[in-house]
Amino acid sequence: MRTGAGVNRAPAVLVAAGLSLAAGILIEPWFGLVTAGLSAGILWKPFDPVTTLAVLAGAASFVDNEGGHMTRDLSMVTLVAVYALFPIALARARGRWRALGGPLVLWLAAFLAWTAVATLRGLLAGYEKKFIGLEVAALGTMTFTWLAAGLRPTARELRPALVVILVAGLGHVVLGIVSYAVNHMRTGGIWYTPLPGMLAVLSLCFGVRARTLPARVGWALLLGLFLLHQTISFSRGYWLGLLVAMPATAFLYARTGPRSLERWRRVGALAAVAGGVLLLTTVVTAVLMGWSDLPALLGTRFGSSFTTGNGSSVSASNLARMIEHAASFRLIQQNPLFGYGMGLELHIRDPLRGLVSKQAYVHESYLWLWLKQGLIGVVLLLAVLFQAVRTALTGAAATDDERSAWCLTAAGVTIYFGVLNLTSFHLAQVNATMFQSLLWGFALATTRPVQLKLVWRAQPAPAAGRAAPIRP
């Protein structure tokens, strides 16, 4: 097998197949499948930076934060990230990559700089390096916004990336369905991550802009499947994020004014087909899993978000979150502006059993960030989110091709993730932050922002003994 440049890819294919087989046998079958998928994505477009970044986002989405294999999972992501830097460096050498500026880049740089300060404070305070590394790894993915934007990808170059990320999303849908077959109960971890919810927003954005009926139907089917995953996750945070992000994204697309009625009709038609797919697949799943009263089950789960006193496990979870929030505020009020540094662990006392536990996370990302980086960090993050939405909407209006759908996706996903942060600590995990950062980069590139000139060395001085020219 040879590329157009005459490079033989057969050895690489054999090595990738061997690694995938070994991972499936020695580690876990699904891990072997993920390895095979990542290898296929890289070998499909070797040294293509845009496709490689999509593979990186797909790899990050499969990091299992609760499975006890963080070192293994993050090692794979790190290897892909290091590999991704090579095609970006090649693009830079060939003049394809240009450093971009603008408000989003400015606020991102400020937030990452403050994160570096908080990281140094955590190290000096002697906090657990493991927790510091995990938190910085998640927030550090925002660096890829700038790297992706500098590539200035065309609509054609983004198509392989779209395929890669959709395949990863469908892999998560399969994992979610398999979860009930394996565990016979609702679980978290790798089985249910935010990526399908983000891809539900993407499916909406691409579906309403599809030009042919088969394409619109295909996007509606994908939308229904991604919504199925988020529905059977029984995660109230995912539900709330979609309940806000989907209507908001539809409004950002259709809005009001000339031709708005036509755009709203497209939204309605897509939603109708996707809703039918969601209803059918959810009913089938309910029958297979033995859920006799699905509406009551969903309603009870959603209503439990606001209860703490009926003695159920869900109410106990809500109570536990209230206790950790109270412990966080007790520390925050002593140092509200600067925080305590990355890696800080909370000491939480259970008032019923009298036991004290330690945890580095908080089930509320803004509260978690306030605790670690202070009010300064929270304000900087909110500024980044605002600029990301603003930049994405500017990019969506700047073009009429597929890049417009990518930009609208970036805006909708930012809203989804911003709402999700109110009920979870996914901001401290790479599963969703990597894909969000790439979306920001693709949107930023579409806005044609100012280009920065990077100077690696100073202007050489005149040679010794050579007299400077005398000007009259």
Image (cartoon, rainbow, N blue to C red):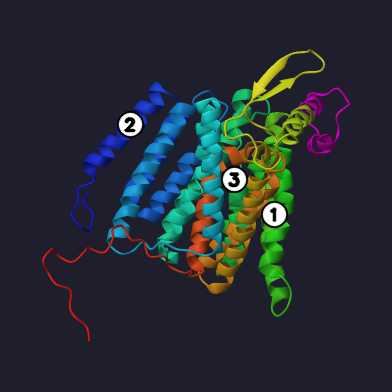
Label 3 environment density (alpha carbons within 10 Å; few <14, some 14–19, many ≥20): many
Residue that mark 2 sits on: 19
Amino acid at dot 2 = Leu
Of circles 2 and 1, which is in front? 1
Q: Is residue 160 visible?
A: yes
* Mark 3 vs 1, N-terminal side: 3
Question: What type is the residue that disc 1 sits on?
Answer: Ala
Indicate the position of residue 464 as horizontal and vertical percent values: 13, 63
| Along the viewing direction, whichever of 213 and 99 lies nearer the viewer | 99
Q: Is residue 79 magenta?
A: no
Residue drawn where x is 58% and y is 64% of the image: 391
Give the residue drawn at x 60%, y 55%. Answer: 384
Q: Which secondary structure lies at badge 2? A: helix
Task: Judge whether residue 169 can be spotted in this image.
Answer: no
Q: Is residue 289 left or right of residue 162?
A: right
Q: Secondary structure at mark 1?
A: helix
Residue extent of the magenta highlight: 291-320
Crowding at label 2, few (<14), some or many (≥20) Cα neighbours within 10 Å?
Answer: some
**Mark 3 or mark 2: which comes first in sequence?**
2
Q: CA distance from mark 2 to mark 1?
A: 39 Å
* Secondary structure character of the magenta stretch overall: helix
Residue tagged 1: 245
Quadrant containing the C terminus in the rendered view: bottom left
Per the image, the residue denoted by label 3 is 196
The residue most toward the left is: 465
Decide which of tag 2 and tag 1 comes sooner along the chain.
2
Which quadrant of the structure image shows residue 193?
top right
- Asked whether residue 304 is drawn in magenta, I would say yes
Judging depth in this view, the residue of 209 and 67 nearest the camera is: 67
